[in-house]
Image: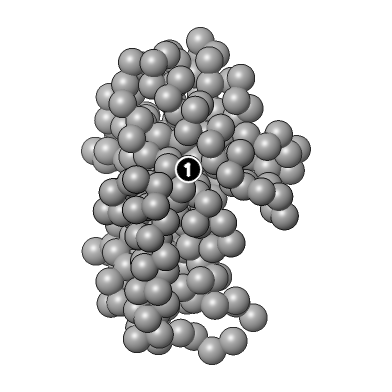
Amino acid sequence: MPQPTSSEIADRAAALRRRIDAAAEEAGRDPARVRIVAVTKTWPATVCRAAHDAGLTLLGENRVQEALPKVAVVPEATWHLVGRLQSNKVRPAVGAFDWIHAVDSPALLRRIEVQAHDAGRAPHLLIQVNVTDEPQKAGLGPEALADAELLAAIAALRRSRLVGLMTIARQGADPRPAFARLRALRDDLEQRAGIGLPELSMGMSADVIEAVREGATLVRIGTALFGTRG
């Protein structure tokens, strides 16, 4: 498939924005609270530049190594790591990304904090929750959000800032129960940890509207903006 132009991306983004705004208003939400993370995985840096030129300032990548040259080309973007982070990639991830969405263990939370301190960085973090209990998916089980080890790791954060939760709904099923559950888990963790967690990263191209209706603040969009990568 040919690379989309900045104009094409802008048109798709505008159409998506209209759908998101309508869904937010129907749910009694402020549409401005929903931000689009344009996921550029598998696309070259030229598409990242085109997306940023089209007004999409939040760019997302799944893999650290694939992202690094793109971050170098579009350093003014706010970069989000939306895929799983391996412990041996924490140092470059903290250096490159402003947001890390898929923190899936207390040990990873602690490791990110150490690297953030050493690098003088202050990343925004989200804990990935496997709300659908699918064995192939990363993320903490819902019950793990109440573990003392996780709560201690959250309380020890100084440089990093935990801002919310992230999930991926089950493919082919109604996503709204999963999204509603993540919202409830976020509310419970706020009480347990004694901190505000304003962000819910949930919803992709196929289920973005359901996510917005259930409270998403960050939606991770690839196909609806860039098309299907050949």
Q: Where's residue 5, x and y in %?
A: 40, 86
The quarter of the displayed image where residue 186 is located: top left
> Helix, strand, or loop for circle 1?
loop
Is 85 on the left or on the right of 157, as rendered? right
Q: Give me the residue at 61% from left, 19% from top.
A: 143
Identity of the amino acid at label 1?
Answer: Glu
Q: Quadrant of the C terminus?
A: bottom right
Q: Residue furthest bottom?
A: 2
Q: Give me the residue at 61% from left, 39% from top.
A: 177
Q: Where's residue 52, x and y in %?
A: 31, 72
What colour scheme governs how the chains and residues are painted in the rendered image of this protein? one colour
Q: Quadrant of the N terminus?
A: bottom right
Q: Callout 1: 10 Å neighbours few (<14), some, many (20+)? A: many
Q: Give me the residue at 39% from left, 52% from top.
A: 26
Q: Is residue 22 depicted above or below 122 in this figure? A: below
Is 35 on the left or on the right of 3, as rendered? left
How many numbered marks appear?
Answer: 1
Q: Is residue 175 visible?
A: yes
Which residue is labeled 1 in the image?
214
Residue in front for this viewpoint, 31 or 63: 31
Q: Where's residue 76, x and y in %?
A: 24, 64
Q: Give me the residue at 31% from left, 54% from top.
A: 31
The quarter of the displayed image where residue 23 is located: bottom left
Q: Is residue 37 visible?
A: no
Q: Residue furthest top?
A: 148
Q: Where's residue 41, x and y in %?
A: 52, 66
Is 197 on the left or on the right of 169, as rendered? left
Q: Is residue 104 depicted above or below 151 in this figure? A: below
Q: Is residue 122 depicted above or below 196 in this figure? A: below
